[in-house]
């Protein structure tokens, strides 16, 4: 093959140089724009001053019979259930209304059920001027564990259909991780967080190092712990006689949520999140993992995956919002768990319910 003369090569390079420079400059410009946008979002997220919040419940809020009357009264709510059923491959509303409880309470069903029920409640709220005005007044939101997905959907970061697919994947992956290695959870009542940490350390030591830790920081005197079955049994055994806990209640859940037991589920969820379109939230959505407002799509993906193996810092979320000036809030969806927790944190706090 005959080589080209150096002069010709140099001439071509010179001719192309402005194009290359323009392309590189354009790329740098786009990168700079994205960086500035991410910086602005981060600053805005850090500087938010909340007045009105929506809170969305997590797994455990479900009950047989929920959403039935809601869907009879509100066609838009029923339409959400129809959309979700198409994605899930079964009649979600029928399970919510008629059970059986064993099916509704399963991890892979309860998560879509609570997600859709909470958003269906919002559809009913939108149907009145007063309800729409309440929605328009909300300037911050958060969700307890699973409820974080509902909050991100409300804030416009995740589309409804994508959210259904994600919580379906999340529930199925968590169930699979729980089935692979037996584990469990228990609620410890009547101890401060540092004492529950001591309790977990003692239970683990007594079981030869079996893992157990706080998984849900709900409010002072109410913390859920997750760990191996022997360690959970040991927590239940020694909490009252050795640490003076008021009570310990073993939870009817599939496994040790929000610990490393869920690492396989986090891997599966990471893959699902990678292919999910995510936008910057229109209002601050507070993360369970770090109690900071979500900013860009990549950080949302990373934080949602990390949430499965990290403790839920709900108590700090509530106290932070109150310290920042939160005036009132509404729990939207099944149950009244969050409003009850808020009252335990601050008796003067206003947290109403809009339930299904």
Image (cartoon, rainbow, N blue to C red):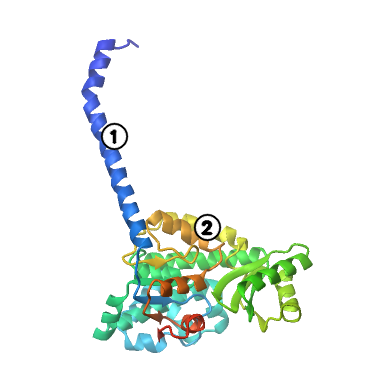
Quadrant of the frame with the N terminus: top left
Identity of the residue drawn at 54% across and 59% down: 266
Q: Which residue is mark 1?
A: 24
Q: Position of residue 192 (x, y in %)?
A: 62, 76
**Apparent side of residue 204 relative to residue 79 in the rendered image (left or right):** right
Quadrant of the frame with the C terminus: bottom left
User: Any mark on residue 38, and which?
Assistant: none
Q: Position of residue 323 (x, y in %)?
A: 42, 73
Q: Residue 310 is drawn in which quadrant?
A: bottom right
Q: Which residue is mark 2?
A: 268
**Apparent side of residue 180 relative to residue 9 in the rendered image (left or right):** right
Label 1 packing within 10 angstroms: few (<14), some (14-19), many (20+): few
Q: Position of residue 254 (x, y in %)?
A: 61, 72
Q: Position of residue 228 (x, y in %)?
A: 69, 67
Position of residue 78 relative to residue 34, above or below, is below
Residue 354 visible in rendering: no
Q: Residue 3 is drawn in which quadrant?
A: top left
Residue 235 vs residue 72, the one in the foreground:
235
Identity of the residue drawn at 26% across and 16% down: 10
Residue 47 visible in rendering: yes
Label 2 packing within 10 angstroms: few (<14), some (14-19), many (20+): some
Q: Secondary structure at mark 1?
A: helix
Position of residue 4 relative to residue 313, above or below, is above
**Apparent side of residue 39 relative to residue 249 in the rendered image (left or right):** left
Residue 188 vs residue 97, the one in the foreground:
188
Identity of the residue drawn at 31% across and 55% down: 40
Identity of the residue drawn at 67% across and 84% down: 246
């Amino acid at each position: 093959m005959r080589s080209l003369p150096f002069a010709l090569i140099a001439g071509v390079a010179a001719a192309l140089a402005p194009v290359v420079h323009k392309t590189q400059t354009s790329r740098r410009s786009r990168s700079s724009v994205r960086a500035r946008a991410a910086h602005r979002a981060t600053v805005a997220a850090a500087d938010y001053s909340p007045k009105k919040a929506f809170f969305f419940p997590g797994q455990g809020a479900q009950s047989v019979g929920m959403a039935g009357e809601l869907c009879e009264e509100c066609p838009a709510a029923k339409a959400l259930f129809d959309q979700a059923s198409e994605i899930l491959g079964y009649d979600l509303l029928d399970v919510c209304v008629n059970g059986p409880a064993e099916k509704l309470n399963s991890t892979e069903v309860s998560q879509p059920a609570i997600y859709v029920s909470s958003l269906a409640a919002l559809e009913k709220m939108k149907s009145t001027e007063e309800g729409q005005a309440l929605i328009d007044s909300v300037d911050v939101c958060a969700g307890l564990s699973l409820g974080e997905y509902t909050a991100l959907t409300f804030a416009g970061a995740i589309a409804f259909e994508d959210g259904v697919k994600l919580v379906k994947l999340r529930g199925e992956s968590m169930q699979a991780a729980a089935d692979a290695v037996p584990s469990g959870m228990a609620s410890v009542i009547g101890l401060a967080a540092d004492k529950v940490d001591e309790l977990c350390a003692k239970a683990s030591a007594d079981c030869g190092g079996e893992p157990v830790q706080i998984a849900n920081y709900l409010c002072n005197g109410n913390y859920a712990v997750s760990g191996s079955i022997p360690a959970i049994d040991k927590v239940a055994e020694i909490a009252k006689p050795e640490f003076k806990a008021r009570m310990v209640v073993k939870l009817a859940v599939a496994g040790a949520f929000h610990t490393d037991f869920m690492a396989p589920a986090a891997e599966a969820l990471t893959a699902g999140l990678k292919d999910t379109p995510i936008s910057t939230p229109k209002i601050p959505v507070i993360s369970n993992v770090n109690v900071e407002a979500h900013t860009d799509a990549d950080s949302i993906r990373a934080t949602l995956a990390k949430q499965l193996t990290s403790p839920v810092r709900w108590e700090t979320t509530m106290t932070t919002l109150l310290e920042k000036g939160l005036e009132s809030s509404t729990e939207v969806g099944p149950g009244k768990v969050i409003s009850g927790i808020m009252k335990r944190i601050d008796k003067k706090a206003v947290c109403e319910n809009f339930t299904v």
